[in-house]
Amino acid sequence: MLLLKLVLLPLLTKAEDLVCKLQGYPDISVFSKDGDIIIGGLFSFYTTFTSKRPNFTIFPEPTKCKSIHFREFQLSQTMIFAIEEINNSTELLPNISLGYKIFDFCANIPHTIRSTMALINGEGDGLFSNLHCTKPSTVLSVVGQASSSSMIGMATTVGPFRIPVVSHLATCACLSKRNEFPSFFRTIPSDYYQSRALAKLVKHFGWTWVGAIRSDDDYGNSGMVTFIQTAEQEGICVEYSESFFRTDPKEKILQVIKVIKKSTAKVIVAFLAQGEMIALLQEIALHNITGLTWIGSESWITSRNLATERNFKALGGVLGFAVVNAVIPGLKDFLFHINPTTQDMPTNMRQCTGYEDLRATKNQYTDTSEMRFANNIYKAVYAVAHSLHHLFTCRNEYPSDFNVLHYLKRVNFTSKTGETVSFDDNGDPVARYELVNWQLRDGIAEFVTIGYYDASLPENLQFTMNNVKIVWTHNQDQVPTSFCSESCLPGTRKAIKKGRPVCCFDCIPCGEGEISNSIDCVKCPVEYWPNQQRDHCILKDKEFLSYEEIMGAFLMVLSLMGAGMTIGITFIFYCYRNTPIVKANNSELSFLLLFSLILSFLCSLTFIGRPSDWSCMLRHTAFGIVFVLCISCVLGKTIVVIMAFKATLPGNNVMKWFGPNQQRLCICIFTLIQVLICTLWLLLSPPFPNSNTAYYKEKIILECDIGSALAFYAVLGYIGFLSALCFILAFLGRKLPDNFNEAKYITFSMLIFCAVWITFIPAYISSPGKYTVAVEIFAILASSFGLLFCIFAPKCFIILVKPEKNTKKYLMGKRP
């Protein structure tokens, strides 16, 4: 393309020199008709067979054109049909007749330029001459030209003359550059949209590993660049991207075949012109390459000469985007009523008798099922006609603006097929495609529409699928797969293999507490944990000692049972409050001790249930104060026992220093010290509910944080100090000679109490979660039951079972 511009642009200032120097070519005029306005047409009726690429530095040798294209002949007749239809219209260009000159460019860039200059200079009726080419162009617009590369040469040639060119098949996105091709228009969408649509199609079916083959020309190279860029954005990897041209040596095509056979990709995107696809299919058939899923471009996906039973074995189930199909009213009859005797047939073609019936002939010309490109020709002719109509309508208003190009940019009409025809600032129409699938029905390949792509819609609505069954290669029921590495299982992440594309990876397990999002591992938030599949985070289970579970219910029952038994004992003591065994050792202390034991049993209930601000502050402070009250009472009873024994000694009047008032004061002082400690604790750093996520990673422990460790251990230490003091005094008085020595039972109770709380500390520290709370409750209940049974059970036994011993004489009697 660059070479073409470098050679042509200096010559375009003297276009007549270029035309007059091109001599020695055969006549290229095929069809013509006079009219008030002439529209030019360029079609490739023949194929050029040459292995030489254009060389613009020397005069080219004449090329041989052969192998007629019936489809191109059909397109030229569609152009003639549209012009005749417009001439017969009373609404569009009334009183103005359109004529045409249709030339053959032989699918060759030099022929394209020669034919273009012939149209511009009116030298198409015979050989070019050496006459000075100075007369104005004989055509106001040119329609046709299929190849993108040839169109680039043609558009570059006519651009300086401001003659609009409307193509029906040139799709290269490069032609949308308005500064380079100011007079170019087309009725087929730019490959920019097709390439993006193909990438979205690949992503839709989950293919991440594809191969790519393209034509080695402007059409294939430009389209494949856009496809690869979009594919990378969509997370699709292209294993290889091979290119060739139909006139390349066979070794080049065999190299492509070798790459296909060696590849692991099961999906191939073939951005090829029809000529390259024919050459490739011949080698694919010879090498028996099957089992691949092919994605085709619009140039060959609806080609009847490719959709043969032989090619279906290799391409069966192929998908691709095609230009929207349409039915043009009246065109079919027009094509079948062509009479060879009315045509000015070239002398090098076999002459017809004039009695042939085209309906009995089956070829691409008579096949009217696929009128996709014919519809583009039809719209192109009508676009030119509408621009001319506006030009003549507005001529009186703008007499100086007599330029078809100006009005062609503003074209906006609805064709007889129901389509809106308009051009954007780049000369491109709205991009609309049909997604077709090759399906074999009764031995004939059909192009079944299974979806649509409309670039005018929002991006999330552009690509839609029909509820039509898709036929895959070898009639597979499921969508084929194509990947370099299988998707990682939940709980694993991708690790890209060194030196390989991003679609080739190993799967590495995620760390603890992480989930995989198919690409990487993501750590769950603190309060969340991976589910069993490790594909999303779920809330962690929250654990606390509740009333609903067995352990919580059991401890609650023990607590209520202890409180109930204490109340029962209190009732017994109250009923027998005047008996010696109750009155002995200060019954007031006994009742106060029983009351504190009831509170001790009940305070354990505050440890059960979901922690809250109030429950956390209450459980520890209530426990500390109540237990100090218990121990203070026991300590008071112990002191009373020892003092009472001392008072029995001659001359000892110690009881007057530790009477009931002193006992009450002692208990109050001991208890108030604990109250002061707990008050400071609550004011400075109170306990609070906490979600512990450190101990268990898969669940949250709802617990009460003690707030201040110093205050907590001060409370326990104070209880321990009183307990030790009480134990020592009771131990010293255990051998007093009374028949009912209460100090002995207090010693046992304090021994149990101290043993429980000594073992509590390591158990409390080592127990996890809700078991920590259970250990604390157990310690409270065990020590409370110890005090209750050791101190009050013997008295109840005497009261209820041995009432004869419930006398002052027995109690004051000396043991042997």
Image (cartoon, rainbow, N blue to C red):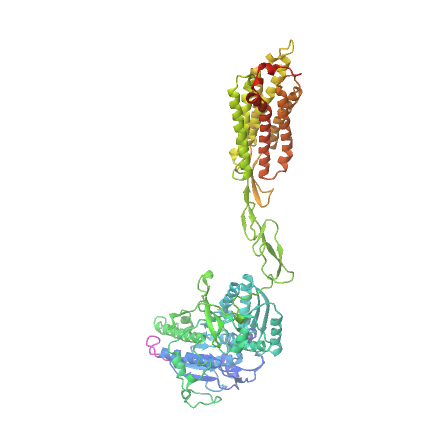
| Extreme residue in the left direction | 90
Q: Main secondary structure of the magenta part?
A: loop
Above or below 205: residue 92: below
Above or below 333: residue 451: above
In the image, residue 147 lies at what x, y percent?
51, 76
499 vs 143, left or right, is: right
540 vs 427, left or right, is: right
Can residue 741 be seen?
Answer: yes
Q: Is residue 90 magenta?
A: yes
The segment highlighted magenta reads: 88-97
Above or below 708: residue 218: below
Can residue 673 be seen?
Answer: no
| Extreme residue in the top direction | 651
Above or below 792: residue 24: below
In the image, residue 235 lies at what x, y percent?
56, 61
**Which quarter of the rendering shows the N terminus?**
bottom right
In the image, residue 34 lies at what x, y percent?
39, 83
In the image, residue 99 lies at what x, y percent?
40, 81
Report the number of discs: 0
Quadrant of res 649: top right
Quadrant of res 658: top right
398 vs 193, left or right, is: left
Q: Is residue 508 magenta?
A: no
**Which quarter of the rendering shows the C terminus?**
top right
484 or 424: nearer the eye?
A: 484
207 or 291: nearer the eye?
A: 291
Instruction: Determine the residue positioned at 44% across, 77% down.
Output: 142
